[in-house]
Amino acid sequence: MKRFVRPLLLLLCVALLMGLVSCVKVGGGDDVPEGMQNATVAGADYRLYVPTTWVVQNSSPNVSSAYRDLSRQSTVSVAKYPLTDAWRAALEALETAEGTEETAGDSAISPRLAWFYENECLRPVRATALDGKVTLDKDASGADMLDKTDAGRWCYSALIGGKTYYFKQLVTERNGAFYVFTFTAEKEMYEQYASDVEKILNAFRFADEPYLPDDFAKETDAGKDAPEGMKACFGDDVAYRFYVPADWKIDLDSPIYAAYVEEDRTSVSVVPYMPTTEHLSVAEYFTMTREQLEKVYGEGAMVVDEDKTHKEKLGSREATVYEYTLTIDGVVYRYRQYIAAYRSMMYSLTYTATEANFDNHTAELADIVAAFAFR
């Protein structure tokens, strides 16, 4: 079963990383409930709506998600997991075994849903929890519904990274796939936003058609308002002007404005973030994101080259420039990140490449930074 732990472990990582990217754009086209916004990832066969006080964060493919407060863990997400051959075999064996009835919280739950929860939801949490311990709230767990579809509901807590996190997960099966709804928060936030989560669950809908939001990034006419040899990579909804070389590809599937070099996937992006605490400095913001990354990828995975930290202009603002590497699945990625505060927001312009390709496009990066402007 080890090879199936990774998808749900990545989902857990997404939950813990929520807030590294914020204020992303979401497309319309659906009847959004009053006071809510669409938080559905492109291509999903369901609709996830969250209150407008939440921040949509769809930086991971196939996972719809949003968070309420970056400074304290409080996230919701929905992920779809199509059945694999190995899962089918395990479930067939389960159904032929005797005594397959499973219960939780005095309410019967489908043994298939219970199996998926135990093996693919709970296992990665135990892998990261202190001593592998997870405490189930039996009274809050039991049979449930997710948009008129039978579901299992499990509520539990675990000590992860020195903090106790509370989880509420609903698992259902539909059209050859499992769907997992997860709410994760520290205790105070878990209780404070319980009513929001109920609204989110009540508004959730499965859909016959995939969600196709408006393009996140739009190319303008080649020469319109762009420096020679560059093109625009921004929309009217942001407070900056971001230009990239004309031969770079604008990433239309990204929830943020981003572009990349097709040959080697070197990329550049701009991420806005609205602080949830007053007087957050650039240094504090960088430290906060670093701590979140190391929670996921492990202590020491991110190495900052302190000698290269310096100040530089980004548009009309002074930015702090950081260079660091991050090791993910054994691959070392190198980053140069410009972070500046503008009108109560933090803006990060981030250049990313493998170590082998990092120096190949730094001259183009200099042009990108020189052309960047705040409105």
Image (spheres, grey):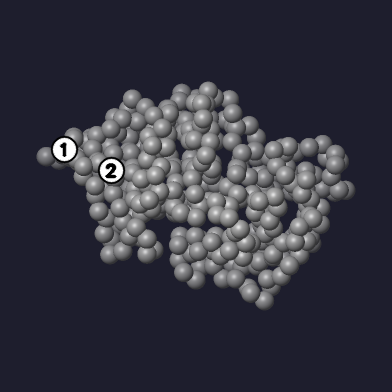
Residue 174, image quadrant: top left
Residue 323: image location, x then y, percent: 65, 67
Q: Secondary structure at mark 1?
A: loop
Left/right placement of residue 372 relative to residue 257 reads right
Q: Nearer the viewer, residue 188 or 133?
A: 188
Residue at label 1? 106
The three-letter code of the residue at mark 2 reads Trp
217 lies above or below 175: below
Q: Is residue 316 visible?
A: yes
- Alpha-carbon neighbours of circle 1 within 10 Å: few (<14), some, or many (≥20)? few
Residue 88, image quadrant: top left
Residue visible at 61% across and 58% down? Answer: 279
43 lies above or below 190: above
Residue visible at 66% across and 66% down? Answer: 322
Residue at label 2? 154
Residue 28: image location, x then y, percent: 59, 28
